[in-house]
Image (tube, helix red, strand yellow):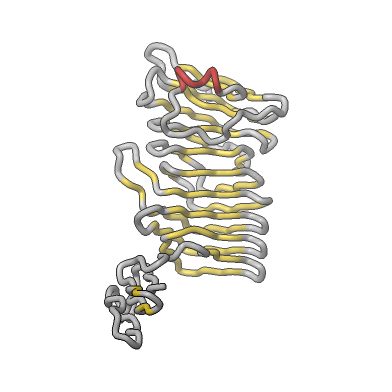
Amino acid sequence: SSDALGTLIINNNGVAPLLAELSSTFTAGSQYPLDGGRAWLHTEAGTKSFAFNNITVKGGGYLGLMGTSVNDTLTLDTYDVSGDRTGGLNILPYQRATFRFAGSTDFPASLYIRERGQAYMPSNWTIQGVNVVNIGAIIGANAIQLKAGATFTIRTGLTVAGAQILQTTFDSIVVGGGCLFTITSYNQIYTINAQSVTVSGAGQISGSRITFNVSTFWVREGGLVNLSHAAAVNGTGMGPGVSIGSYAGGAGHGGQGGIPALGYAAGSFYGSLQSPQLFGSQGGA
């Protein structure tokens, strides 16, 4: 583009910063001297946007945007990203990055999107051998494919306006061998909407408090959907059983829980027996 600068090269010669993922409270102006190893794009008076034809990130280098305050709205626009998969980009709150991908849709750098941050991605997005953490909004990506040990982590986040993000939508998700797709929702159910999800051999989906609204869900031989340790524990949930001494009532869900011999309280009914949508509870222990 004639309006964009040429190529920005971030090369740290193999020395990565202390932290790949920055927290939402990171204040660049006061803390960046302690963050050696990351390159920063500084705004000038009246300048809130940066545009490049190409950004090359390699040698463990990382790139961040720095405004005059934590709440500055900054934008980064690039037509291509290249690199050796050792570096990454940080999108902090109120920042927006657009990756247009004139050529390959393989993103060769790790990407960390904080709450209230936005990343505009190509429709078909290949994540190969790098890490993506999203606590903000990913816009435009319809099909994502994880390859070569890539990880993709979604955590409950916030939109720019401060609304909680509790769902995301893709046409297709492919988790390749050795790759990990993780969803973490701390208090409420997070929904993944997709036409198809495929977990290949040695690929894994893990998380807690997840609902999949999917037309076709394939778990190939050796693939794994792992929800271990994500259930309610120790008599918790919406219908927990009660424990007294060595006796305990069973948990309820689509019906009342089991009543022990001495008649101690069992977990109450909640949700639907025919079409359960809520998480289970745990009996007394």
Q: Is residue 242 left or right of residue 169?
A: left
- How many numbered callouts? 0
Report the front residue among 92 and 245: 245
Question: Percent x, y for residue 180?
Answer: 59, 55
Q: Which one is in front, 117 or 48?
A: 117
Tell whether 239 sits left or right of 136: left
Determine which quarter of the picture holds residue 67: top left
**Residue at far top of view:** 45
What is the quadrant of residue 6 in the picture? top right
Residue 41: x and y in percent read: 51, 20
Q: Quadrant of the C terminus?
A: bottom left
| 34 lies above or below 166 | above
- Residue drawn at (52%, 63%), measured in percent from left and top? 197
Does residue 7 appear anywhere in the picture?
no
Q: Most extreme residue toward the right, as rendered?
A: 13
Q: Measuring 33% from the left and 77% from the top, which residue is drawn there?
A: 252
Q: Nearer the viewer, residue 24 or 268?
A: 268
**Which residue extends farthest bottom?**
261
Q: Position of residue 284 (x, y in %)?
A: 38, 73
* In the rendered image, the vertical position of residue 104 relative to residue 169, given as above or below: above
Q: Residue at x 56, y 38 (%)?
A: 101
Tell me which residue sits at (55%, 44%) in the image.
Answer: 132
Question: Viewed as shown, does residue 34 lie left or right of 29?
Answer: right
Residue 41 appears in view: yes
Residue 174, given in percent of the width and then of the height, sits at 58, 58
Report the side of 2 relative to 278 (left or right): right
